[in-house]
Image: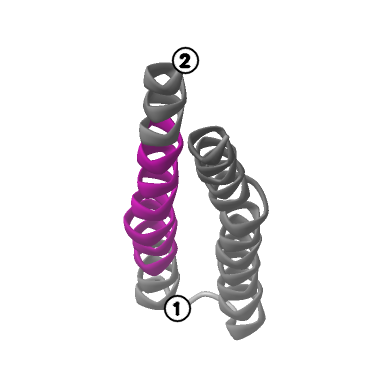
Amino acid sequence: MLDSIDQAIHNATYQAKMTKIFLTWYILGIGALSVINLIIENSNPWLIGMITVIFIIGFLVGKWEQRAWHDKQRDDLIALRSKLLSD
């Protein structure tokens, strides 16, 4: 039983790391490239600002999801493992 919980903790930790990598390199990278492309094309400053805000909101929502779901799931599994070990 503990092996299954250890595997679940490992999976939750991996999932949290992958979410963090995705947020950092994919969303921020694509956001930066998009904004740079808009600047090079001399787009409307309002459009550049709106696109920047949309990517920032997407990043913040992703961080919230990571804390609220992935990290909480891992912490719950660790607490369950501790409780089983203490019994």
Q: Residue at x 66, y 73 (%)?
A: 50
Q: Nearer the viewer, mark 2 or mark 1?
A: 2
Q: Which mark is residue 4?
A: none
Q: Residue 25, how many percent across, how many down?
A: 32, 57
Q: Residue at x 46, y 25 (%)?
A: 5
Assign a secondary structure to mark 1.
loop
Q: Amino acid at mark 1?
A: Asn
Packing grade of label 1 (10 A; few <14, some 14-19, many >=20) is few
Residue 30 lies in the magenta-colored region:
yes
Residue annotated with mark 2: 1
The residue furthest front is 87
**N-terminal-most mark, 2 or 1:** 2
Residue 49 occupies quadrant: bottom right
Residue 15 occupies quadrant: top left
Front residue of this view, candidates 34 and 27: 27
Q: Please provide the residue range marked out in magenta.
A: 11-33
Q: Which quarter of the rendering shows the C terminus? A: top right
Count of numbered circles on the image: 2
Residue annotated with mark 1: 42
Q: Residue 54, how many percent across, how many down?
A: 64, 66
Front residue of this view, candidates 74 and 22: 74
Q: Residue 77, how many percent across, how many down?
A: 55, 38
Packing grade of label 2 (10 A; few <14, some 14-19, many >=20) is few
Q: Residue 70, how many percent across, how many down?
A: 56, 45
Left/right of residue 53 with respect to residue 13 in the rendered view: right
Q: Residue at x 65, y 61 (%)?
A: 64
Residue 47 lies in the magenta-colored region:
no
Q: Amino acid at mark 2?
A: Met
Front residue of this view, candidates 75 and 30: 75
**Prevailing SS of the magenta stretch:** helix
Assign a secondary structure to mark 2.
loop
